[in-house]
């Protein structure tokens, strides 16, 4: 990748639009980027990185900081880069999110971040994700790799050179993506720890099972069991002990079972004797009970036969009652007719009364309606003009609301203006305070800078000798040497003071812009406010305008409130008028309907009166011939007769049933007596008490033996379970320990924990390969820079077996044949070694990235520590690196480089704020 043209607009310190035409610098060689401190030299590389990847090159800058503080609101912020990659030309343009002037009205609005990528075929991509993907596919590397290859940044030279193994591991992990090996190391360590814990858990589990072994107190194995529980026996002997215990208990269990079986047979014989004796005793008692029952049933049979004869004599009464019920049933239809006629008569009487009431109400309603119609007609006349009155009042209130709104806006504008005046006053005060701080810091910096320069001259004077040329003027005579002042600030203190001065200048500028912005807003607002005062209140000053405006607003609000109440009253009148116009036609129609209904009701009353006379005559005729006054009384008599008949019939059936049941019981009892007598014939009585005593003794023995057998069985089950679990866990422990041994060995090897050997981890071993290649590439340049004196070499043996090793760096001094730590190099030598190592790292990353093509590189600072020869050697090494197809930019303040490098980009600060750049080719 080679940049062709870079355009910055309102970006960083560049307030306006600045173009960098890299074609002027050619396609290869060295060029210098120089200029004022803070003018924006490193910003050039930031801009290239941002254009390509959407992020700055360093971690100490953010995208939100790219908007130039010197730029006008109307100037857009963007970076546009045209670059060539493998003979194809691409153009990418990006802008961050920033605030710009609003296109409509005053104020500011937020410009969203955007990007455009123009491909060689003219196709334009505008979506951030697809542009980022396309750039990565074109370049073949991501942002971090690009920064590592294309930029050797200030402050990073010594970091890689002097870093111990532990720090280099972190650096290389990020660069060469070796974290997967570190993850493998950690995973192996965790797996080994997990397997170790698993073995401990299995051993603990086996101990718990051994603790659960049960043994008979009389057993010869008790001593061995005690040893096992105290962890005094190996697991194999514990298993053998359990086998012996199980065999012993199984034999005892079988013998106990045989004893129980013999005693149970004796008990079964006695149980049969007891059952037979109890059967004879029960048969004797039952025979006595059966004889008594026979005597009772014979007496009961005589009584039931007499009762049945008495009930049969009542059969004559049934015929009489049945005949009476038939006569009453024949008259039942006439009772229904009587009820119907009585109901019809009552209904007609009720209808006549209801119609008479309706007739009277209709006459009253007619009088009321006539009065209501007259009243409504009069009220409608008084409400005829309320609609016109409402329109007039509504027009008035619209006019008043318009004036009220304008006055309220004027009042708010005057209050805002007052607030702006106060804010402007505060802003001016802040500006003055910040300007005073700047003046103080500027004086301090100038004084310190002069002391520092005088001190440098003093230091130089201390080394001057007579007849030796001065390195500044070349004179051999030094009659008046410069003296070294006291209380001289260090360069770091001066830099810190300069940074504070720069930050204070930024604050002054921001305060000035804020005060100016407020003043502009006040002037713009003042003109509009005075115009509104004149239109609404007349020629009065602004001081009295606020009170007059508030009075007018109060008066207008009172008027609007009064008119609103009048409109509400008119709305009610209009609603009443509409209601009357609906009610009057309905009332007139209702009056006509009532007058028609009076005639209809009178005719209906006459008809009902005539029907009632005929109904009354028929009712009188029916009452004279019927036995009862109503059908209800007739039905009650029929029901009473039927109940009496049913009662007599039920009594006869019950008496018959009871006699039959008695005969059946008598026959059954007689048969039972014969059967019991047969059972007792020839049977001898058994002594049940003696037999039960024998049985109790035998059952007690059985219970004791069964309890003993259950105790043995419980012991067997428990020991079998423990035997099975111990054997299972023993096999599991063997496998777990075998696996742990393998994984622990792998973990120790991968994590560099092998006893007696250097602590080199797997990841470090992989990184050593990359480091050797970096050192090889670095030495190719270091030998040029140091005139063949030094070679970098990776330390083969660790200084200590305790710490991590494998990536420590030493240097071979070919002048004296010694090998020592790189930390022993001088400042200039360290710079050359650091630069060579950084260039070697860049080459290795580029190689590892898969054949990418980067035709440009930036080197930021570091040359100030070199003497004239070392600077020449470093320049020769860089010149060899910068072939005809590779362009290297050196960012530096060193004056000698300006003389050595013809092609330059000079960046300068403008007094008005911002920076400008010039290319000299």
Image: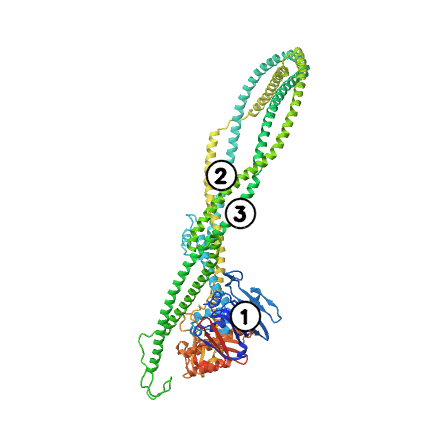
| Secondary element type, mark 1 | strand
Foreground: 162 or 681?
A: 162
Residue 230, relative to residue 313: is it above or below? below
Residue 824 found in image quarter: bottom left
Q: Nearer the viewer, mark 2 or mark 1?
A: 1
Q: Earlier in the sequence, mark 3 or mark 1?
A: 1
Whole-percent x, y for residue 833 in the image = 44, 78
Q: In front: 138, or 263?
A: 138
Residue occupied by mark 1: 80
The residue beneath circle 2 is 263
Q: Which mark is residue 39?
A: none
Residue in front for this viewpoint, 475 or 606:
606
Q: Which residue is mark 3?
A: 398
Q: Nearer the viewer, mark 3 or mark 1?
A: 3
Q: Secondary structure at mark 3?
A: helix
Inter-mark Cα distance, 3 to 1 = 58 Å
Whether 373 is drawn above or below 843: the answer is above
Is label 3 or label 2 in front?
3
Closest to the observer: 132 or 659?
132
Q: Please report whichever mark, 2 or 1, sits nearer to the chain's N-terminal start.
A: 1
């Amino acid at each position: 990748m080679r940049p062709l043209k870079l355009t910055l607009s309102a970006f960083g310190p560049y307030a306006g639009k600045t173009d960098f035409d890299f074609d002027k610098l050619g396609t290869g060689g060295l060029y210098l980027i120089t200029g004022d401190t803070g003018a924006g030299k490193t910003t050039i590389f930031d801009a290239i990185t941002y254009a390509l990847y959407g992020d700055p090159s360093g971690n100490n800058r953010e995208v939100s900081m790219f908007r130039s503080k010197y730029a006008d609101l109307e100037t857009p912020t963007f970076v546009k880069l045209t670059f060539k990659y493998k003979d194809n030309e691409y153009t990418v343009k990006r802008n961050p999110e920033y605030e710009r002037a609003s296109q409509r009205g005053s104020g500011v609005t937020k410009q969203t971040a955007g990007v455009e990528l123009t491909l060689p075929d003219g196709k334009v991509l505008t979506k951030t994700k697809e542009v980022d993907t396309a750039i990565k596919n074109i370049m073949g590397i991501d942002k971090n790799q690009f920064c590592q290859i294309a930029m050797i940044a200030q402050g990073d030279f010594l970091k890689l050179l002097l870093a111990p193994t532990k720090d280099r591991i972190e650096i290389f992990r990020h660069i060469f993506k070796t974290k997967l090996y570190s993850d493998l190391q950690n995973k192996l360590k965790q797996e080994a720890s997990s397997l170790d814990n698993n073995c401990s858990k299995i051993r603990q589990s086996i101990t718990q099972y051994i603790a659960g072994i049960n043994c008979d107190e009389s057993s010869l194995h008790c001593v061995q069991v005690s040893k096992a529980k105290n962890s005094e026996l190996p697991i194999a002997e514990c298993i053998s002990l359990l086998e012996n215990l199980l065999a012993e208990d199984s034999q005892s269990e079988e013998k106990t079972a045989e004893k129980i079986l013999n005693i149970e047979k004796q008990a079964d014989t006695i149980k049969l004797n007891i059952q037979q004796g109890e059967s004879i005793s029960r048969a004797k008692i039952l025979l006595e009970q059966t004889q008594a029952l026979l005597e009772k049933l014979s007496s009961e049979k005589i009584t039931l036969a007499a009762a049945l004869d008495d009930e049969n004599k009542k059969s004559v009464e049934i015929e009489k009652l049945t005949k009476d019920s038939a006569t009453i049933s024949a008259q039942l239809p006439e009772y229904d007719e009587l009820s119907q006629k009585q109901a019809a008569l009552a209904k007609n009487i009720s209808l006549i009364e209801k119609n008479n009431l309706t007739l009277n109400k209709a006459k009253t309603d007619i009088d009321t309606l006539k009065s209501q119609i007259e009243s409504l007609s009069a009220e409608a006349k008084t409400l005829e003009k309320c609609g016109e009155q409402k329109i007039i009042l509504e027009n008035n209130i619209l006019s008043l609301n318009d004036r009220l709104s304008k006055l309220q806006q004027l009042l708010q504008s005057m209050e805002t203006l007052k607030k702006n005046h106060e804010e402007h006053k505060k802003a001016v005060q802040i500006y003055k305070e910040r300007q005073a701080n700047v003046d103080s810091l500027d004086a301090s910096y100038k004084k310190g800078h002069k002391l520092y320069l005088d001190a440098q001259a003093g230091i130089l004077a201390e080394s001057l000798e007579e007849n030796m040329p001065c390195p500044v003027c070349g004179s051999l005579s030094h009659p008046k040497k410069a003296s070294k002042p006291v209380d001289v600030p260090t360069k770091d203190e001066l830099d810190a003071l300069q940074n504070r001065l720069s930050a204070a200048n930024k604050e002054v500028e921001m305060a000035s812009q804020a005060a100016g912005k407020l003043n502009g807003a006040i002037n713009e607002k003042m003109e509009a406010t005075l115009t509104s005062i004149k239109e609404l209140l007349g020629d009065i000053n602004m001081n009295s305008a606020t009170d007059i405006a508030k009075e007018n607003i109060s008066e207008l609000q009172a008027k609007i409130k009064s008119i609103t109440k009048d409109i509400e009253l008119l709305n009610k009148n209009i609603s009443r008028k509409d209601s009357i116009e609906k009610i009057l036609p309905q009332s007139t129609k209702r009056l006509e309907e009532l007058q028609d209904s009076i005639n209809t009701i009178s005719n209906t009353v006459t008809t009902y009166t005539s029907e009632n006379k005929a109904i009354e005559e028929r009712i009188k005729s029916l009452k004279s011939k019927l036995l009862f006054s109503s059908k209800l009384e007739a039905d009650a008599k029929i029901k009473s007769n039927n109940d009496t008949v049913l009662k007599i019939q039920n009594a006869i059936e019950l008496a018959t049933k009871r006699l039959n049941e008695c005969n059946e019981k008598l026959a059954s009892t007689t048969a039972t007596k014969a059967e019991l007598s047969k059972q007792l014939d020839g049977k001898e009585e058994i002594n049940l008490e003696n037999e039960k005593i024998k049985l109790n003794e035998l059952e007690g023995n059985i219970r004791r033996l069964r309890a003993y057998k259950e105790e043995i069985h419980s012991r067997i089950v428990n020991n079998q379970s423990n035997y099975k679990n111990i054997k299972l866990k023993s096999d599991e422990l063997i496998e777990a320990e075998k696996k742990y041994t393998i994984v622990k060995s792998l973990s120790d090897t991968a994590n560099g924990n092998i006893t007696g050997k250097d602590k080199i981890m797997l990841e470090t071993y992989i990184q050593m390969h990359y480091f050797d290649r970096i050192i090889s590439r670095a030495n190719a340049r270091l030998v040029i820079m140091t005139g063949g004196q030094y070679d970098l070499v990776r330390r083969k043996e660790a200084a200590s077996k305790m710490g991590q090793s494998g990536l420590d760096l030493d240097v071979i001094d070919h002048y004296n044949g010694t090998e020592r730590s790189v930390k022993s190099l001088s400042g200039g030598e360290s710079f050359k070694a650091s630069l060579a190592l950084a260039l070697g790292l860049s080459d290795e990353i580029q190689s590892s990235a898969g054949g990418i093509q980067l035709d440009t590189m930036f080197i930021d600072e570091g040359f100030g520590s070199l003497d004239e020869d070392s600077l020449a050697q470093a320049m020769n090494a860089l010149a060899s690196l910068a072939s005809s197809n590779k362009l290297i930019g050196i960012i530096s303040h060193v004056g000698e480089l300006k003389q050595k490098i013809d092609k330059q980009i000079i960046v300068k600060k403008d007094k008005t704020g911002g920076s400008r750049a010039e290319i000299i080719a």
